[in-house]
Every structure is written in structure tokens, then in C-alpha cells.
Image: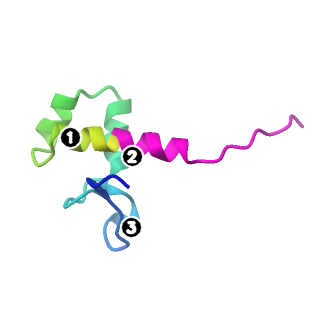
Amino acid sequence: MNERIEIHPRVCGGQPVIKGTRISVAAILEQLAAGESWDSILHGYPELTRADIQAVLDYARQAVLHTEITALEPA
């Protein structure tokens, strides 16, 4: 796992978060998907760095690459 992302059962229900924060990977991904700029996200979360946002993207990429997808036959 990325050194900037951590999962702990007592933090945010075990969802992946940026290390040392309660800011979830999902929250940052949702903001990026909504078109928020990195600068806007960093303004809203001054404790984050560009490296943290890059870590979120890297984590999401790895999650997709390591997810087994099975094609379904049409019914």
C-alpha cells in the first residue's frame, strides 16, 4: 500500500484515508470527479500536500488494477 494512505478499523469505519488525517480517499476522489482542481482541494484541506493527492490517485489506480473483473454473459 502507498505510504501516504492507511486503513485502520477505528478511523472512518476502516475506509482508506490519507495518513494522519480523517480525510478519506473517497472524499478526494469525489471532489476530483466533480471537477475540483488540486489547488481548490488543497485550499479546502490545508493539511494536505500535492503528494497526498497523487497518493490518492495512485491508490485508486492500484485498486482498479488489482480488482478481478468477470464479464457477464447476456441473459
- Please identify, in this view, whether the residue under mark 1 or under mark 3 is nearer the observer: 1
Q: Where is residue 9 in the image (x, y as percent from the top left)?
A: 38, 72
Mark pair 1, 2: CA separation: 12 Å
Work out whether 74 lies above or below 11.
above
SS label for mark 1: helix
Crowdedness near tag 3: few (<14), some (14–19) or many (≥20) residues, C-alpha within 10 Å:
few
Q: Where is residue 24 in the image (x, y as percent from the top left)?
A: 32, 53
- In primary-sequence order, the first of circles 1 and 2 is 1
Work out whether 63 lies above or below 31.
below
Mark pair 1, 3: CA separation: 24 Å
**Residue at image point 36% right, 29% down:** 34
Corner quadrant of residue 38: top left
Q: Mark 3 belongs to which amino acid? A: Gly
Q: Where is residue 64 in the image (x, y as percent from the top left)?
A: 52, 42
- In primary-sequence order, the first of circles 2 and 3 is 3
**Residue at image point 19% right, 61% down:** 20
Magenta part of the chain: 57-75
Magenta span has 67?
A: yes
Name the residue beneath numbered marker 2: 59
* Quadrant occupied by the C terminus: top right
Name the residue beneath numbered marker 3: 13
Magenta span has 68?
A: yes
Crowdedness near tag 2: few (<14), some (14–19) or many (≥20) residues, C-alpha within 10 Å:
some
In the picture, the disc for residue 51 is 1
In the picture, the disc for residue 62 is none
